[in-house]
Amino acid sequence: MYDYLESNIPHSIMAYTTDATLTNNQLFPRHEWILDYLQRYAEPINHLVKFSTIVTGVYLQENPARTTHKRWHLKATHLPSSQTITANYDAIIVASGHYSVPYIPSIPGLAAWNSSYPDRIDHSKHYRNPSSYTSKRTLLIGASASGLDIANQISSTCLSPLLLSHHSPPSSSSITMADKIRDLPPIATFLPPSSGHRRAVRLSTGEIIDSIDKILFCTGYHYSLPFLSSLSPTLITTGERIHGLYEHIFWQPEPTLAFVGVPFKIIPFPTAEGQATVIARVWAGQLPLPPQSYMQRWERERVTAKGGKERKFHEMPDLEDFDYLNRLVDWACQAGQVEGMIPRKWDERDYWARKRFPAIRKALAGMGEARRGVRSLEALGFDYEKWKREQEQKDGVKERAVL
């Protein structure tokens, strides 16, 4: 986690349903405050957590005592003592995240370029602050949330302009240092020294960019589940997605294995609540899962809907995660009046705010240090109630004009 990192989500939307204390901070909380929020949220269950322990294997085994069910065997290592821990469970939830193994795209000439010019290429996983980029001609590859945030940081210290290569142009409202950043198309080739160009790349347009001092890939991460490698069929192949999941949650061959937090480009805490709510009700026998054939069809249709691109399978852009959470809540409510928490559904106000995230971020960044005193969207000039009244007035004028 890098220095100066702040959330790209307003606290009013980011927080868990059952704990709104995050809203006591600035509108886009700093990472230290989010860590404190999570630690306090987890305090009631800390006694159930085995800290400093790494899971090394999870194995599915037949349970001779219960012929209708299977049990899971888990192996782990307690790191301080190197002690091996084993245990059996009726069900397993994997909530290990997917930001550990950096993804660097395969680009012609990259490996040879790295050998010729060592210590010049890095990934955002290892980024901490912009100091090592001071006065350096810097190429940043990738323009999703962290890429844009890091670009704004580095552009204030590197040799201007920062070179930002990406497949699709980011929203102009996402860039707060646009005058110090040059947008570039994708890289076609990393050029070797024998090309006659020094530390150079060729862009998809044919243009050559040379004398590059630093390259930072902000291209995301692979999914990695080494502790589930014994399972068949295989969950991980290329690392671009997890295979065999239904609704990004249940492993179809044996749904007593479930996942929380697999999708990306989401509001993570409420989405995790929705997934956990469904898991709890399914495992409690209050919600049925559809037949395996239906779950398999869902997966195939998801692949088709994403154009066959494996890396897009778990991606939820353009408010898709809002629709997903609302669908999960509706699904959980099918269990009827049962004990347990139900997350709130996203409403019209939430959708309105989410559509304006880039503009909200830009407005806040433009305030400099004064942004730390902003506690609400209204204080920043994004007033939903005012907007709604204005829309109603406009609709009324249009209606009278038609009459």
Image: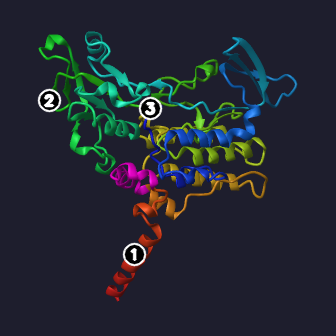
Three-letter amino acid code of the residue under disc 1 = Glu
In the picture, the quarter occupied by the C terminus is bottom left
Q: How is the image coloured?
A: rainbow
Picture disc at residue 51 = none
Q: Residue at x 42, y 24 (%)?
A: 126
Disc 1 residue crowd, few under 14, some 14–19, many 20+, Cα 10 Å: few
Q: Position of residue 102 (x, y in %)?
A: 44, 25
On screen, residue 171 versus residue 159, left or right, reads right
Q: Is residue 290 visible?
A: no
Give the image quarter of residue 6.
top left
Separation of marks 3 and 1 at Cα, in angstroms: 41 Å
Q: Residue at x 78, y 43 (%)?
A: 284
Q: Position of residue 204 (x, y in %)?
A: 20, 31
Mark 1 vs 2, N-terminal side? 2
Mark 1, mark 2: which one is toward the viewer? 1
**Label 1's element?**
helix
Q: Residue furthest bottom?
A: 403
Three-letter amino acid code of the residue under disc 3 = Tyr
**Label 3's element?**
loop
Picture disc at residue 390 = 1
Picture disc at residue 2 = 3
Give the image quarter of residue 253.
top right
Mark 3, mark 1: which one is toward the viewer? 3
